[in-house]
Image (cartoon, rainbow, N blue to C red):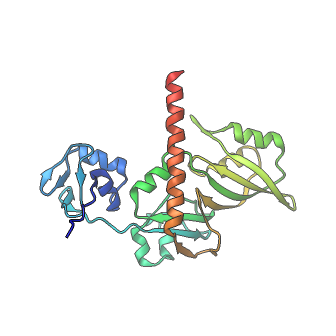
Amino acid sequence: MKKVKEEKVRLNKYIAQSGLCSRRKADELIEAGVVKVNGERITEMGYLVNARDNVSVNGQTLKKSTLVYVKYYKPAGYITTCDDEKGRKTIYDILPPEMKELKPVGRLDKDSTGLLILTNDGDLINKLTHPSVKIPKIYRVVAEGKLNSDELLQMAKGIEIEKGKIAYADVMVVDYEGKNSVLQVTLYQGLNRQIRRMLDYIGHPVVSLKRVSHGTVNIQGLKKGQFKYIKPKEIKDLLKQLEKAEKLQQEAAKKKDLQ
């Protein structure tokens, strides 16, 4: 009988797929000398392991987790964290107990609603939230007053929402609700309360804010408080988009070096 060749993966990827941390953080752990494979301390970047190897970090044996991906329609009134020292309600108070093992990809503030991707794939979380990789997040925002073209341009060119931090947003007016503007806002950054602070700056406070998509994943078919497991094809499409974004970032970096 022909022997099946065992698949080997890089050690940092194995650690990330255990759900312990991102691949980048795994590199730091390997470099720090706290990772062992079959009892031997490994500090070599690029070291390969397979499913039969015993991998431990700080003496704790890791198991390669089954990767889980969930899309969740966050309702207003809940914060995006597992525990809160102030005793506020969190998304995990209304999600099933098994979801506590999953971490959110980015956050939505207490008053915001819409899409959150939850997963135990630390590598994907790191890639989707890393500032160098430009993956679009699209929001439906209702803001006070009627935005004019100069204000839309100002948001595109950038607003300093705090010292040294410039926030950018692509904004379109898609409708009006009485005296309010209905906006489609696209972000490639993840600054704290970014949209609210930008619109406050130009004098159009947010009335409501909902994230409708993150990369290729959207909340279509979900009601507030509902979740669905993301299909493998959807994850494949998201990974393709990430790969393309990473290539564009690398090409841009090369051009900058040549200038």
Query: Is 166 on the left or on the right of 47, as rendered?
Result: right
127 and 168: which one is in front?
127
- The quarter of the displayed image where residue 100 is located: bottom left
Residue at horizontal 24 percent and vertical 65 percent from the top: 4
> Farthest right residue?
178
> Farthest left residue?
39
**Residue 230 placement (x, y as % from top left):** 51, 69
- The quarter of the displayed image where residue 201 is located: top right
Q: Is residue 232 visible?
A: yes
Q: Quadrant of the C terminus?
A: top right
Looking at the image, residue 16 lies above or below residue 4 = above
- The quarter of the displayed image where residue 178 is located: bottom right
Query: Is 216 on the left or on the right of 148, as rendered?
Result: left
How many numbered discs sit on the rendered protein? Answer: 0
**Residue 168 placement (x, y as % from top left):** 65, 42
Q: Is residue 88 visible?
A: no
Looking at the image, residue 15 lies above or below residue 156 = below
Looking at the image, residue 198 lies above or below residue 141 = above
**Residue 236 placement (x, y as % from top left):** 50, 60
134 and 159: which one is in front?
134
**Residue 198 placement (x, y as % from top left):** 68, 46
Residue at horizontal 67 percent and vertical 45 percent from the top: 169
Q: Quadrant of the N terminus?
A: bottom left
Looking at the image, residue 26 lies above or below residue 158 = below
> Farthest front residue?
1
Query: Is 33 on the left or on the right of 196, as rendered?
Result: left
